[in-house]
Amino acid sequence: MITELQILKENDELMGQPYIREIGLDPLVVLMFSDEQLKIIQHLSSAKTLDLYVDATGSVIRKVHGQKRPLLDSLVAELQNTTVSLADMLTTKHTIPRISHFLGTVKRQLSL
């Protein structure tokens, strides 16, 4: 699975459309968001109309051998009565530092 993710990440970068931003194996962590999603965050935050929250969902992928159950943590916003994912993290380590790293990575990308 990691090899396939790395190939996808490299292909996205070659096409100038990065989506997979970071991959880690132990613990499993995959950070995913597009430049378009970042632009939405920037636009809505400049208009002062952005409330974000983190939503976690299980059963997205099968269990990773020797690790805890993977969860998909999504940074979401309510837009026109629809919940929209603006960044995602798939991980088997569900801790405050891991979620802080995820949010910090998104924030750093916004300031580039």
Image: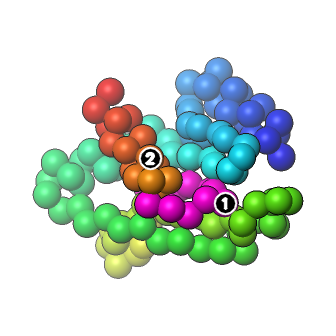
Q: Is residue 62 above or below residue 97?
A: below
Q: In which quarter of the view is residue 44 placed?
A: bottom left
Residue pushed farthest bottom? 81
Q: Residue at x 72, y 74 (%)?
A: 59
x and y percent of residue 24 in the render?
A: 67, 41
Q: Please tell me how many numbered marks the rendered image carries.
A: 2
Residue 11 against residue 91 in the figure, above or below:
above
Q: Which residues are magenta?
A: 86-96
Note whether residue 75 is visible.
yes
Q: Residue at x 46, y 49 (%)?
A: 102
> Residue 110 in the image: x percent, y percent?
32, 37
Q: Nearer the viewer, residue 82 or 26?
A: 26
Quick one: label 1, few (<14), some, or many (20+) residues within 10 Å? many
Q: Quarter holding the C terminus?
A: top left
Q: Residues within 10 Å of mark 2 (few under 14, many from 20)?
A: few
Residue 92, numbered label: 1
- Toward the viewer: 84 or 59? 59
What residue is drawn where x is 13% and y is 57%? Answer: 48
> Which of marks 1 and 2 precedes in the sequence?
1
Amino acid identity at mark 2: His
Closer-to-camera residue (109/95): 95
On the question of residue 36 being in view, the answer is: no
Residue type at mark 1: give it. Thr
Identify the residue at image location x=51%, y=46%.
33
Residue picked out by circle 2: 101
Is residue 5 rendered to the left or right of residue 23?
A: right
Which numbered tag is attached to residue 105?
none
SS for tag 1? loop
Name the element at disc 2: helix
Work out how far the residue at label 2 is from the one at label 1, CA to CA, in angstroms.
14 Å
Q: Is residue 69 left or right of residue 93?
A: right
